[in-house]
Amino acid sequence: MDIRNICLLGHGGSGKTSLVESMLYLTGVTDRLGKPADGNTVCDYDPEEIKRQISISLAMTPVMYNGVKINVMDTPGNFDFAGEMQSGVRAAEVGVLVCASKDGLSVGAERCWKYLKEQKKPCIVYISKEDEENANFSTTLEALREKLSKSIAPVVAPIWDENKRTIGIIDVLNKKAYKRPENKKGKRVEIPIPDSKMKVVDELYGQLMEAVAETTEENMEKFFAGEPFTKEEIMTGLKVGMHEGTLAPVVCGSAVTGLGTEMLLSTIVDLVPGPQEMPAEKATDESGENAVEVKRDPNGATAAIVFKTISDQYGKYSLVKVVSGKVTGD
């Protein structure tokens, strides 16, 4: 099965748990959109989480999108539970850094970014809560690029109405625009790209092509010769850029309206490396003295990581990531 393992991280209240709800609702896993304030979200199921209306421990749920199984790990943003975030990053191939549009760069987001870089894990940035008053995609993006890294590059451009409210988004790579779904469970609706946005889209597209050009000598030569990249070369180049940390794609949206959720899922499927594409895990042999590398091989000797153990009224169980071989139910 084609699998992606992602970890949502960011400051408390940035909308991580709500984003998971939007993913589950869009893909038909749930039949209603849960809200932390109502205490009915899938990931915040613990009585203490429901009471406090915050995430306390790492929670995991799978969603299926375009034939790919995406294991989504939702982590707390509160600094008191930083260990839960670290456990999620350990098991994921990519971190999805969630930043609220009206908050700019928060301390929590900055801390999570630094941790991802320390662990050499790729990152996607999701600018959330685009439906709220005072949301400002441009200001938030500028703060992220200025304070964190110039490698942060948008693959979307928001469409605003006269009141600066986000009413749609533009997929820069495919040069297509979409407005928010007619209903929260509906699919995005394609619309023409507004004339006023064409210059911005071309500029962002050019920046992404520069990122693709920097991945190989062949791409660089092709870029300077003025030859267009094929779709395959673009996607491969962007994946390599993510892998090497020279590119962190930015998407945006609203978990409440569903705008941007499908774009995020598409970005995960297209750009996030599968587990088998990641480098070998460093470990020690049975003596505990000699360093070894465990290659990601489904037919190899069984090796796995227990990244979270949960103990509750139903018993004690562990979340395990299999690196090599197979683990069966018995």
Image: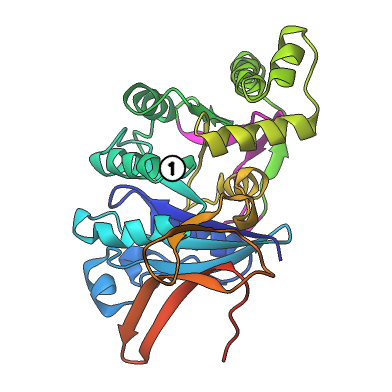
Is residue 197 positioned above or below 307 on the image? above
- Report x, y in % for residue 235: 70, 35
- Report x, y in % for residue 94: 50, 49
Is residue 194 positioned above or below 2 on the image? above
**Which residues fall within the magenta stretch?**
165-186
* Helix, strand or loop at mark 1: loop
- The residue at 58%/88% (across/down) is 329
- The residue at 33%/57% (across/down) is 85
Q: Choose between 78 and 115: the one closer to the eye.
A: 115
Q: Choose between 251 and 275: the one closer to the eye.
A: 275
- Report x, y in % for residue 303: 53, 71
324 left or right, relative to 309: right
Where is mark 1, residue-wise? 120
Q: Choose between 162 and 191: the one closer to the eye.
A: 191
Graded by Cα atoms within 10 Å as few (under 14), some (14 to 19) or many (20 or more), the crowding at tag 1 reads some
Residue 105: quarter of image: top left
Q: How is the image coloured?
A: rainbow
Is residue 271 positioned above or below 88 on the image? above
- Report x, y in % for residue 68: 69, 60
- The residue at 72%/39% (across/down) is 190
Magenta-span inclusion, residue 147: no
